[in-house]
Amino acid sequence: MGAQQDAQPAVQELVVQVADIKHLFTAPDTDPLAQHEGEVMGEPALLRVVRRLMAAGNLGTGGKLVVLLPTAKTEPGLAERTHAALVRFCTLRLDDNDAELRILRREAARLLLRGLLILAICMGLSSLFRGDTITFLPPLIRNTLGEGFNVIGWVMLWRPVETYFFNPLPIRASSAALRFLRSLQVEIRAQPAPVDAARASEIGSS
């Protein structure tokens, strides 16, 4: 009974290794020979974290962002300053995502009005060609034009549907990842010291 009470769920840790704390938010120079992924790709470490969270889908609840820094780059109070910067960064990005969603909704409404107008015109032309009003064209051509305008009219509605329902999906996934990141605690740890070649040779021969 006591063992069950003492058992605590493991805290989810997102581990990021950077050469400098600013590389968490800003892109370093691209260096394919570098040790850290962000420097190899030339992009901020947080961008890679957000991308991986979006790919994972199930974000879970709570956790900790562990930033591995060279020992010389660690200093007292850095974790608190990094956490404040993380919250500010995520909040600003969330504001940008919300603004982009509003733009998409407004664009979708504009496209819908245009699509409905074109649909009405195409349906009218479709009825005209499939009816008995136009008699100087062969029935095959009239039916082809009628069906063609019918298809064109409905196709014109795809763009507003895509803009309203599908284009926001990656933005909403990004917002979910950013809200999760904003809720994380930040811990700064020193990177393990690399073993030099001579020391590795001694270890291997012993």
Image: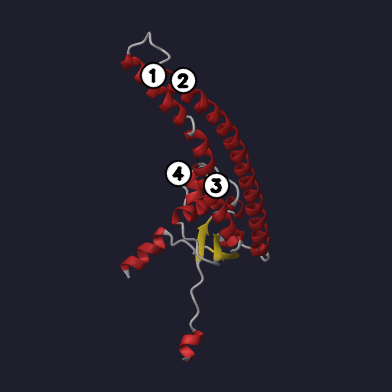
Q: Residue at x 50, y 85 (%)?
A: 6
Q: Residue furthest front?
A: 132
Numbered circle sitting on residue 32:
4
Q: Which numbered tag is attached to residue 171? A: 3
Residue that badge 2 annotates: 125
Q: Amino acid at mark 3?
A: Ile
Q: Circles 4 and 3: CB distance less than 8 Å?
A: no
First in sequence, mark 4 or 1: give its number.
4
Q: How is the image coloured?
A: secondary structure
Distance CA(mark 4)–CA(mark 1): 58 Å
Q: Secondary structure under badge 4? A: loop
Check whether the beta carbons of the residues at disc 2 and disc 1 lie within 8 A of each other. Answer: yes
Query: In front: mark 4 or mark 2?
Result: 2
> Which mark is first along the chain, 1 or 2?
2
Identify the mark nearer the N-term, 4 or 3: 4
| Residue 36 drawn at (x, y percent) | 48, 52
